Amino acid sequence: MALLIIFVLIPALWIFWLAFQRWDLISGTSDFIGTANFERLLLRDDIFRKSVWQTVYFVAATVPISMALGLFLAMLLNQKMPFRDFLRTVIFTPYVMPIVSTALIFGFIYHPDVGVLNAALNVFGLPKINWLGSPQAIMPAIIIYSVWQHTGYNTVIFLAGLSNLPPELDEAARVDGAGAWTRFWQVTWPLLSPTTYFVLLINVVASFKVVQPILVFAGGVGGATAGGGGPDKAAETIGYYLYVQAFAFFHAGYAGAISVVLFLIILAITALQVGLFSRRVFYR
Amino acid sequence: MRRTLDLLPRYLVLVPFAALFAFPFYWMLVISLGTLQSVFVFPPILYPLWHWDNYLSAVGLLPDPATGATLHIPWVRYFINTIIVAVGSTALVLITSTLGGYAFASMPFPGKKFIFGLVLAIYMVPTEVTLVPNFIILAKLGWIDSYQAQIVPFGASVFGIFLMRQFFMGLPHDLWDAAQLDGAGHLRFLWAIATPLARPPLVTIALFHFVGAWNSFLWPLIVTTSDNYRPVQVGLQAFSYADATNPVLHAAGSFIVTLPILVIFLLAQRQIVGGIAASGIRG
């Protein structure tokens, strides 16, 4: 309990103090500068503005794709069948694997000249893409990686949700002659809404604070002295910008201001989702 | 027979998807067993060439075939560091989860509801947000570049406390009454009776935490500055960015770092996947 207070609660409150300081991590000096950090961050910082949009882009692509894919695979696996556990395990494995090594391998897969992904595109007559080296492609590349990494988690949660549904309703609809498509949208989807809602909330919050994939895919791209973030800062996210400001430039106060904004955004999203969906979700 | 035929379309979709999800691991193996020439061929060679000696080069037992120089990477040190951190923080989490969960489940104390609410609120605070203040706290404690910097901040887990509380609340009250009759206090009851019964949730917590600690990267990257305390993930990052230039060895290094956690996951996948399905924890 004391640990939680010291390392979570106090820091969480402390960022609201830190954000009003000019605080240098190397010398450890600090002085109170009022709202100057926020003024610069919200009004004048183009990189921060870009990072907000790139984060929204990342969330808006990663979450729906990995959720839809997760639900689709869960529907297919939601039946007694040979190798079911094996398939589920294979799909889930990326989620528990270390990010540095899997990202390293994706670096090979994404290689512009000899990467296997471009080779696959080539088979279909499509041109080679400079996945990690061009501002248009780096975010999609990181999104593909994140979908690969997180779909298994969504599949497992959806599977658990599906196995809790009463089979009688689906059976009754089948007897009434409803096809698979109708049964899914009219029976399964509404019944599954508490699970979907939970998965959505968890996915949005987790992808909103994304740092590590950016760090490993784009940390060294776009110039380390400029803080990385990919060509043209195309892979800059709020979480990554926070990391760079604090631990590459040692601007702890400024990073504190970013932390505050990120924290408030996440709280707002959570509150919004709770408010928007909790009444519409079908609870049994 | 008919059932198998019904299932066939499912397999036709599922198997290619599963193959896609597994492909990067296969590819890791293919690259790590190739040569500097073979991995730069287009279209790529899709099968392994079985150059196992790449692994010996990656750990510094053989010279790097590309440069002829022998690498000196303290892999053993990295692995020991990771094991110390993972085991240490897992042990700490098990203790704090048991004590905290028990206190919230079975002991009356003033402000309990409020404090439990506080614990749940803490669950909502993303670790990324507390990165900077936590770093400053550790710097003030003089803990930068140490094991405790990687262990203590993660020594208590809301998920663990919550799971243990649920478990202890489900224990029949008669057990506690009987133990009290025999003169046992809370601690003795917890140690001798409740904790042994709590094996299943403890195993779940331990597995999650261990995997999370093994894979943790961002935090140790920030708080370690020397090889003495660096875990394997940060070591691999340094290896692939700076120490080795031969990409084939990067893949071999990745595989070395991935293999232990892959083995642990495959052995314990029933508990891990089951635990996720039951609790929805997300690392």
Image: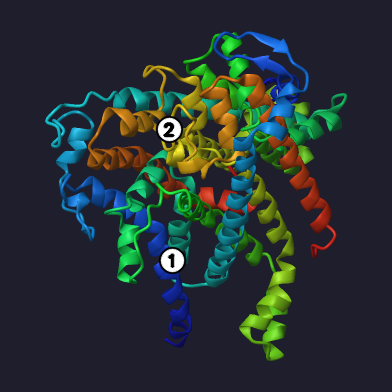
Direction from residue B262 to residue B92 in the image, left or right: right
Whole-number angstrom distance, CA of label 2 to CA of label 1: 36 Å
Helix, strand or loop status at disc 1: helix
Q: Which mark is residue A223?
A: 2
Helix, strand or loop status at disc 2: loop
In the image, residue A63 lies at what x, y percent? 61, 55
Badge 1: residue crowd in 10 Å (few <14, some 14–19, many ≥20): some
- Dot 2 and dot 1 within a common chain: no
Residue farthest toward the bottom in the current orientation of the protein: A177
Which residue appears at 55% of the width and 9% of the height?
B142
Asked if disc 2 and disc 1 are in contact, CB closer than 8 Å, the reply is no
Residues A144 and A203: in front is: A144
Label 2 resides on the chain identified as A
Q: How are the residues colored?
A: rainbow
In the image, residue A160 lies at what x, y percent? 62, 60
Badge 2: residue crowd in 10 Å (few <14, some 14–19, many ≥20): some
Which residue appears at 59% of the width and 29% of the height?
B93
Vertical relation: B156 (above or below) A139: above
Label 1 resides on the chain identified as B
Which residue appears at 72% of the width and 34% of the height?
A43
**Quadrant into which the C terminus of chain A falls:** bottom right
Determine if residue B184 is in view. Answer: no
The residue where tag 1 is placed is B17
**Quadrant into which the N terminus of chain A falls:** top right
Q: How many marks?
A: 2
Which residue appears at 51% of the width and 53% of the height?
A143
